[in-house]
Image (tube, helix red, strand yellow):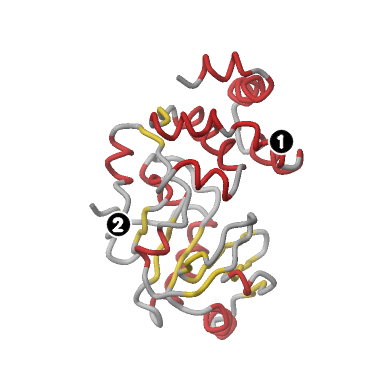
Amino acid sequence: MKYIFKPKINLEKFGSKVFSVLVENFSQTFFVGGMVRDLLLKKKTTDIDITTQGKPEEVSKLLKLAGITTDDKYKNFGVIVAKHGGLQVEIATFRKDLQNSSRYANVVFINNPKIDSLRRDFTINSLYLNGITGQILDFNEGIKDFKNKTLRFIGEPKNRIKEDPLRILRALRFSLVLNFKIEKKSLLALKKYFSLLETISKTKINNELNKISSEKLKRLLQNALDSKKILDKLFK
């Protein structure tokens, strides 16, 4: 599948500039995650993530040489943030988790986007877009789930939830906002481990809720968090 990316808003134009700098030096550089998902859904781009084979130090150096400001405080996790005015783009080196005992696992940098894709949450968030050729790499049948309007965890659902219980709330949010049905095995795991949300701070939960622009959907999700009965009714 191909999608020809034509930047329109300032965030997309800045993201395209960052991408161009990186892909000239690292052929395996892609837009990934929510941006690709929203482009395919014809939704407004609200954040941009780029992933690349370049190591954090290399990425930071190249961007600075191109006159782009960077924030390197997350480089040990493989992430460099490019900034311009109030705009920012996150660039992550292909990674593989060494352990998942916390939300921030130890990682090792790799040169394989397919392996990198396995650490992402849902299939529809694991599409890799080449901003020049328009080619989309789909390692987890994300396009198929798009067409079927299905939300599915990558890998074993219970493991992905235990790695990061916030994914429970993200699954519910995406399902409501995108009007996607949560795949059966994923939904069963979500409900079984729902109590793990109690380990997540109120701040993180509110941050997820605030990503919903519709007040009606926000109230629905809040009610589902407060009542098992409403949760079962909304997500079945």
* Left or right of 188 on screen, residue 57: right
Name the residue rendered at 65%, 37% in the picture.
Answer: 196
Name the residue rendered at 40%, 70% in the picture.
Answer: 29
Among the 4 quarters of the image, the one containing residue 38: top left
Name the residue rendered at 50%, 59% in the picture.
Answer: 49
Task: Reply above or below: 230 against 25.
Answer: above
Could you tell me how many numbered marks the image carries? 2
Q: What whole-number distance in Å separates the C-alpha atoms at marks 2 and 1?
A: 37 Å
Q: Position of residue 47 (x, y in %)?
A: 55, 52
Name the residue nearer the viewer: 68 or 223: 223
Task: Reply above or below: 186 against 11.
Answer: above
Label 2 crowd bin: few (<14), some (14–19), many (20+), radius 10 Å: many
Q: Are marks 2 and 1 in contact (CB under 8 Å)?
A: no
Q: Position of residue 65 (x, y in %)?
A: 56, 86
**Res 198 label:** 1
Indicate which disc, 2 or 1, sits on the residue closer to the N terminus: 2
Task: Reply above or below: 211 against 16.
Answer: above
Q: Quadrant of the C terminus?
A: top left
**Res 136 label:** 2
Q: Position of residue 149 (x, y in %)?
A: 35, 32
Amino acid found under the numbered disc labelled 2? Ile
